[in-house]
């Protein structure tokens, strides 16, 4: 089922299933993927977020149930007429009124508080009794629609989490490396060994517990947003590529350093640099133009002499 969804989502987002290898010898291509514990970590974060939403939905259901019960009780109370006080029979002796004891200040405050509570309850009951009959069914419908949408987004966000994990591609050749991540926001960066300045491993406490690490590769040139976010001082002038959440960080680092050493020992350069070096300089062009102009003048003089 997931593979069916994956193929159609990649086709819809116009994302190729696998990136093209960067510049390098065909036999030198090495492909690395994020560790499976990285997927478990992403899945745990997704589960915590969904659990919080489920708790919120449960509280809303309890609140709506209590509200519905209060509305029904208020309507029943409003439908029952209040009993009228029966007058005392004629000729009946009037009981002697004994002087009531004066209440204390604490009793007076408690009685006032109870009276305020009774007044509030009567006001709420009156409001609920006047609530239109369609309000509660409408609220129930909206709640059921929200639950259905929550179930749909659970499937959708789970598919996104898994696709995001599977779209982490790290490719290393003997001349360059390429990193591709993302599904909704596709990011692909290529670094030539001619520009790589630093390779380091970074590992947080959670990654250390899961046996994961990040390999940071920095290369010279311009400095981008990632370099400004990660670096300070001199690092701001470096591009940054991250092999995120890999379980063989030492192998990747050693491979890049070894191929970088061979690349520099072989004296290989970037093809763009080679083409720039082969291009004629402005001084040589100027000298060639002067020589051509001199030959043209000499030819013109010879023609004039013969004529």
Image (cartoon, rainbow, N blue to C red):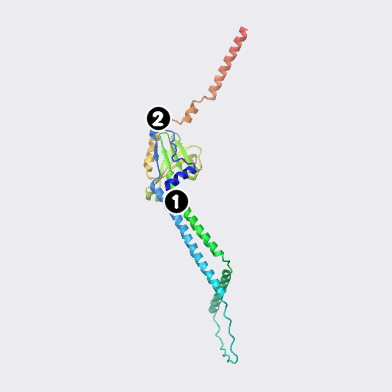
Quadrant for the C terminus, please. Answer: top right
Q: Residue furthest top?
A: 306
Locate residue 289, reporting x and y percent.
56, 20
Residue for point 52% across, 62% down: 140
Relative to 302, is 198 on the left or the right? left
Query: Measured along the vertical axis of the image, is residue 173 above or below residue 35?
Result: above
Relative to 16, is 136 on the left or the right? right
Q: Which residue is mark 2?
A: 266
Residue for point 51% across, 43% down: 225
Query: Measured along the vertical axis of the image, is residue 140 above or below residue 9?
Result: below
Residue for point 54% across, 62% down: 139
Please state which of residues 128 and 51 is positioned toward the viewer in this rendering: 128
Q: For residue 32, which quarter of the picture?
A: top left
Q: Which residue is mark 1?
A: 158
Q: Is residue 292 visible?
A: yes
Of marks 2 and 1, the one in the foreground: 1
Measure the C-alpha gap from mark 2 to mark 1.
47 Å
């Amino acid at each position: 089922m997931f593979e069916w969804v994956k193929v159609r989502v990649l086709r819809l987002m116009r994302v190729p299933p696998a990136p093209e290898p960067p510049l390098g010898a065909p036999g030198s291509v090495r492909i690395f993927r994020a560790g499976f514990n990285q997927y478990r970590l992403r899945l745990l974060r997704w589960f915590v977020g969904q659990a919080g939403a489920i708790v919120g939905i449960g509280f809303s259901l309890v609140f709506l149930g209590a509200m519905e019960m209060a509305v029904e009780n208020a309507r029943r109370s409003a439908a029952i007429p209040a009993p009228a006080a029966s007058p005392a029979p004629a000729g009946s002796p009037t009981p002697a009124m004994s002087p009531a004891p004066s209440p204390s200040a604490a009793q007076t405050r408690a009685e006032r508080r109870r009276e305020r509570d009774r007044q509030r309850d009567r006001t709420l009951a009156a409001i609920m009794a006047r609530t239109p009959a369609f309000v509660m069914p409408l609220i129930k419908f909206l709640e059921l629609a929200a639950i259905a949408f929550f179930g749909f987004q659970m499937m959708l966000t789970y598919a996104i989490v898994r696709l995001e994990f599977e779209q982490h591609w790290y490719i290393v050749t003997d001349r360059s490396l390429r990193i591709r991540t993302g599904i909704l926001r596709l990011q692909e960066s290529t670094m030539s060994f001619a520009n790589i300045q630093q390779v380091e491993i970074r590992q947080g406490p959670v990654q250390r517990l899961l046996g994961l690490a990040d390999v940071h590769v920095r290369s010279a040139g311009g400095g981008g947003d990632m370099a400004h976010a990660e670096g300070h001082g001199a690092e701001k002038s470096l591009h940054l590529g991250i092999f995120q959440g890999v379980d063989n960080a030492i192998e990747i680092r050693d491979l890049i350093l070894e191929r970088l050493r061979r690349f520099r020992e072989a004296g290989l350069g970037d093809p763009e640099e080679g083409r720039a070096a082969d291009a004629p300089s402005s001084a040589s062009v100027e000298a060639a133009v002067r020589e051509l102009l001199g030959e043209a003048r000499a030819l013109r003089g010879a023609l004039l002499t013969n004529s």
